């Protein structure tokens, strides 16, 4: 999703995907940040696809990540800040 989002951008300086992994107390946090263009609709904490051919299947990959995180005592958070998309996954450290 991040790769597709930055490929659509015209500004080469925004064609960046940042991945950060860090330990926070008893949790491991993995955050993926990328620029995007247009608007992003979030439903139940998950982005809704903008691809017409995938309507009804929106957020399947992100939803799967959310379920896996919850299964192992963590959680997933999606947010935007202007033209930045930020996905964070928090997992309990083994």
Image: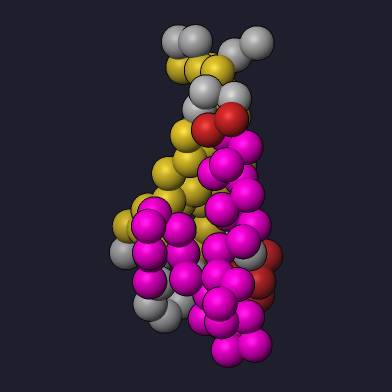
Q: Is residue 58 above or below residue 34?
A: below
What residue sits 42% from the left and 80% below the top? 38
Total number of numbered discs in the rendering = 0
- The segment highlighted magenta reads 41-69
For residue 53: magenta? Answer: yes
Q: Position of residue 77 (x, y in %)?
A: 43, 44
Q: Position of residue 93 (x, y in %)?
A: 59, 14
Residue 51 is drawn in which quadrant? Answer: bottom right
Q: Position of residue 17 (x, y in %)?
A: 61, 54
Residue 10 is drawn in which quadrant? Answer: bottom right
Q: Position of residue 29 (x, y in %)?
A: 53, 28
Q: Is residue 36 above or below residue 46?
A: below
Residue 61 is drawn in which quadrant? Answer: bottom right
In front of the other: 80 or 7? 80
Residue 13 visible in rendering = no
What residue sits 39% from the left and 54% below the top? 45
Quadrant that contains the N terminus: bottom right
């Amino acid at each position: 999703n991040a790769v597709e989002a930055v490929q659509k951008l015209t500004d080469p300086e925004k064609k960046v995907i940042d991945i950060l992994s860090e330990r926070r107390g008893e949790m491991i946090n993995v955050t993926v940040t990328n620029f995007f263009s247009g608007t992003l609709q979030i439903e139940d904490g998950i982005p809704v696809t903008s691809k017409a051919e995938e309507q009804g299947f929106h957020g399947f990959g992100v939803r799967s990540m959310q379920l896996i995180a919850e299964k192992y005592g963590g959680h997933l958070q999606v947010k935007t800040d202007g033209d930045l998309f930020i996905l964070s996954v928090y997992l309990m450290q083994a």
